Image: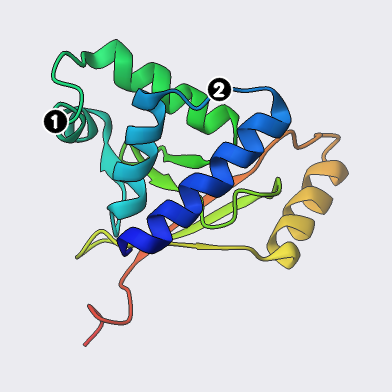
Amino acid sequence: MNQKETQRLVAKAEKLCEHRGARLTPARREVFEILAAETGAIGAYDLLDKLKSAVPNAKPPTIYRALDFLQEQGFVHKISSSNSYVLCSHFDHQHPVQMLICEVCGSVQEIQSDGVYDALRKQAEEQGFKVASQTIEAHGLCQQCDI
């Protein structure tokens, strides 16, 4: 993602935080910018290494607190299978999370299929289960790697 697009997303996130009464601190903002620059998911300790160039005294709790905040605000998604994080492609509204993860290059594409969500919710309801949140990770090959 180019610098102009990153700054647009940061401004959008700041506006949402202001509207919600939340605070995008300098460390949180820096983590957001690092995630925006990534093409795939990144682990917390790799994020910490990158954060240290801007915040030299950053420690693991710094990164985890920032990630917790960014997740709570809906700005990032955690990829459970790899314990990594990716910036949400449309964080201005709540939505079920569905991600396509390339096993070769690590790229992550977020998709939104209401049909998938509705089918899962319907099946859950038939079992007497109420879905509180949904994250689906599909692993495979992206278009560039499937040659």
**Which label lies toward us, 1 or 2?**
2
Measured as percent of width and height from the top left, residue 140 is found at 34, 67
Residue under circle 2?
23
- The reply to whether residue 14 is in sight is yes
Q: How far apart, in angstroms, are the residues tagged by discs 1 and 2?
A: 23 Å
As displayed, is residue 5 above or below residue 44? Answer: below
Mark 1 secondary-structure assignment? helix
Q: Quadrant of residue 114?
A: bottom right
Residue under circle 1?
49
As displayed, is residue 132 above or below residue 147? Answer: above
Q: Few, some or many C-alpha atoms within 10 Å of disc 2 (few <14, some 14-19, many ≥20)? A: some
Count of numbered marks: 2
The way the protein has been coloured in the rendering is: rainbow
Which residue is depicted at the point 48% across and 41% down? 76
Which residue is depicted at the point 33% across and 63% down? 1
Horizontal side, residue 22 vs residue 35: left or right: right
Mark 2 secondary-structure assignment? loop
Q: Quadrant of residue 51?
A: top left
